[in-house]
Amino acid sequence: LLDGDILKDVLTAYGHPSGRSSWDPMLVLLACINDEEKAGYYIKRGRASLDIATGYNHFVFDANGPHRFVIKKFPDSFYADMIKN
């Protein structure tokens, strides 16, 4: 996202050095496409949890877990081009 973009500002204001790591524009793109291969991701299963005191989330990989973790296959430019188009 470009400097001055309201979504970038919100993600940065979250307080984590790399912004909020969930429900960013790339994951919204994945949800809209609804196909991890076409969207350029690997999906890993596991169990997510949240530290209520800090707001940090944690993920433990587990093949039988109820949650999923998304891993990029391509450089950021691939996803930026998809989002722009």
Image (spheres, rainbow, N blue to C red):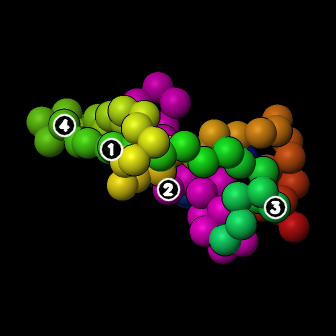
Q: CA distance from mark 4 to mark 3?
A: 33 Å
Compared with residue 82, is residue 62 higher up or lower down, i.e. above or below?
above
The residue drawn where x is 26% and y is 42% is 49
| Front in this rendered view, residue 63 or 10 | 63
Compare marks 3 and 1 and give the one earlier in the sequence. 3
User: Depth-wise, is mark 2 or mark 1 nearer the camera?
Assistant: 1
Say which amino acid is labelled 1: Ala
Outermost residue on the top side: it is 17
Judge depth for marks 2 and 3 and give the one in front. Answer: 3
> For mark 1, does the 10 Å Cα neighbourhood hold few (<14), some (14 to 19), or many (20 or more) residues?
some
State the image coordinates of residue 16 (x, y, percent, origin top left).
40, 30
Residue 22 in percent (x, y) is at: 47, 49
| Label 4–label 3 contact, CB within 8 A | no
Q: Amino acid at mark 2?
A: Trp
Which span is picked out in magenta?
Answer: 11-33
The residue type indicated by label 4 comes to Asp
State the residue position of label 3: 38
User: Of the residues under marks 4 and 3, which one precedes in the sequence?
Assistant: 3
Q: CA distance from mark 2 to mark 3?
A: 18 Å
Look at 67% across and 45% down and name the residue there: 42
Residue 6 lies left or right of residue 46; in this view the side is right
Q: Nearer the viewer, mark 4 or mark 3?
A: 3
Q: Earlier in the sequence, mark 2 or mark 4?
A: 2
Q: Position of residue 57 (x, y in %)?
A: 31, 38
**Mark 3: which amino acid?**
Lys
User: What residue is rendered at 67% in x and 71% in y?
Assistant: 34
Residue 45 placement, left or right of 36: left
Which of 82 and 49 lies nearest the eye of the viewer? 49
Q: Mark on residue 51?
A: 4
Residue contact at pointers 2 and 4, CB within 8 angstroms:
no
Residue receiving disc 1: 48
> Taking the image as drawn, is residue 71 in sight?
yes
